Image (cartoon, rainbow, N blue to C red):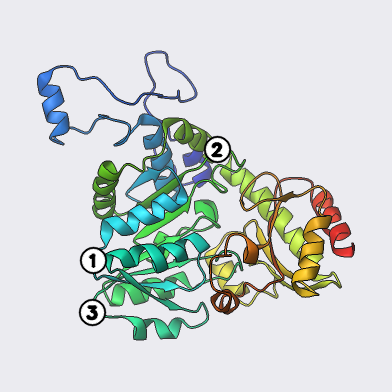
Amino acid sequence: MSSKHIETEAIRTQIERSQFLEHSSPMYLTSSYVFEDAEDMRASFADEKERNIYSRYSNPNSSEFVEKVCKMEGAERGYAFASGMSAVFSTFAALLDSDDHIISSRSIFGSTQTLFNNILPKWKISTSYFKIDELDAIESLIQPNTKVIYAESPTNPAVDILDLKRLGDIAKKHNLLFIIDNCFATPYLQQPIKFGADLVIHSATKLMDGQGRVLGGVTVGSSELIQKIYLFSRISGPALSPFNSWVLSKSLETLPVRVDRHCDNALKVATFLESHENVKLVKYPFLKSHPQYELAKKQMKLGGSIVAFEIKGGIEAGRQFLNAIKLLSLSANLGDTRTIVTHPASTTHAKIPEAIRLETGITAGLIRISVGLEHPEDIINDLKQALEN
């Protein structure tokens, strides 16, 4: 029996129990699987049967993890990867041919920009960019060889919000694939397929794991598109490991309650920062001062775990602030139980030219906070003393 509630699907979606009738899904640490006889082996390799052959192709743990994400996102099928970036690369590599063209939001993760700018051009795959506040320009960027519209929402790291329905409508009008990186929101807060996305990508390393333990990625969407991604990945080998699959599947069981708390803490942190005299600017989707506040409320259940803010005094003030942090973590990850403070211009987006960083709101003094699950007073007190020191 299927439930329509994400909280229940995340907990009750499980692989078939073994003869031991375990309550919690076991870990299948196996590289390969045996066959009943020669005919079973032949039919399996001929794709006449749906069964596990080799863990580079599929594994019970990765199948359970993917099925949960599909039910939460409203997708038909998916494939799990060793990392978020392997999901991004494999998705594009599987679906694009030489001389194809991508239209992408300028405000995307630094490694994704590097992929578009430096790696995919090796196969003559080019990318044109639009600013998040210039969706009207998208149609003028469409070429005869354009295949994909790609975006993140909320964006990394400036937490801007893009109108997913509008992007979906443009893609549908021009028969383009619409692909969304949804890892900041998770399927608990936002389901892009409802707004017209053909594929949804996640870095499961972030909130899906939620404790900074394992790497993982997943792409979900239509069966037809995922079949192409599966066939590419079956050969190229970016599969998620059984152990990481097991960890991530268990983590999804607590995703809704964790994200609720993350969002509650993040709103309190954003509200505090907005009132501090040493803070120039704060961006959080569910702050009324956010430029796309009404759109965020329309698309998302809550505002997410990421707060971006700019300290008065520029890069030197930012450096002093980071050095004054005592309780919180200085790291480049996000979506952890522990609150993490990052300086994007010198870390995650350091390889992006300065002019492009400024174009996407990544100033020298911008700080990204991934708000964790500590008591909000303790998070705020550490930020307060760092801002005043």
The first of marks 2 and 3 along the sequence is 3
User: As drawn, is 295 to the left or to the right of 343?
Assistant: left
Residue at mark 1: 98
SS of the residue at dot 3?
Answer: loop
Residue name at image x 39 percent, y 81 percent = 138
Task: Please say if the residues under marks 3 and 1 sit with CB atoms less than 8 Å apart.
Answer: no
Q: CA distance from mark 2 to mark 3?
A: 43 Å
Q: Residues within 10 Å of mark 2 (few under 14, many from 20)?
A: many
Query: From what the image shows, is residue 251 above or below residue 34?
Result: below
Report x, y in % for residue 44: 17, 30
Q: Amino acid at mark 1?
A: Ser
Report x, y in % for residue 361: 61, 75
Query: From what the image shows, is residue 233 above or below residue 144?
Result: above
Task: Please say if the residues under marks 1 and 2 sit with CB atoms less than 8 Å apart.
Answer: no
Q: Amino acid at mark 2?
A: Ser
Residue name at image x 48 percent, y 36 percent = 249
Query: From what the image shows, is residue 268 above or below residue 20?
Result: below
Report x, y in % for residue 178: 35, 66
Residue at mark 2: 251
Q: CA distance from mark 1 to mark 2?
A: 38 Å
User: As drawn, is 133 to the left or to the right of 199?
Assistant: right
The first of marks 3 and 1 along the sequence is 1
User: As drawn, is 42 to the left or to the right of 5?
Assistant: left
Q: CA distance from mark 3 to mark 1?
A: 14 Å
Label ID, residue 144:
3
User: As drawn, is 288 to the left or to the right of 240?
Assistant: right
SS of the residue at dot 1?
Answer: loop
User: Marks 2 and 3: which is nearer the front?
Assistant: 3
SS of the residue at dot 2?
Answer: helix
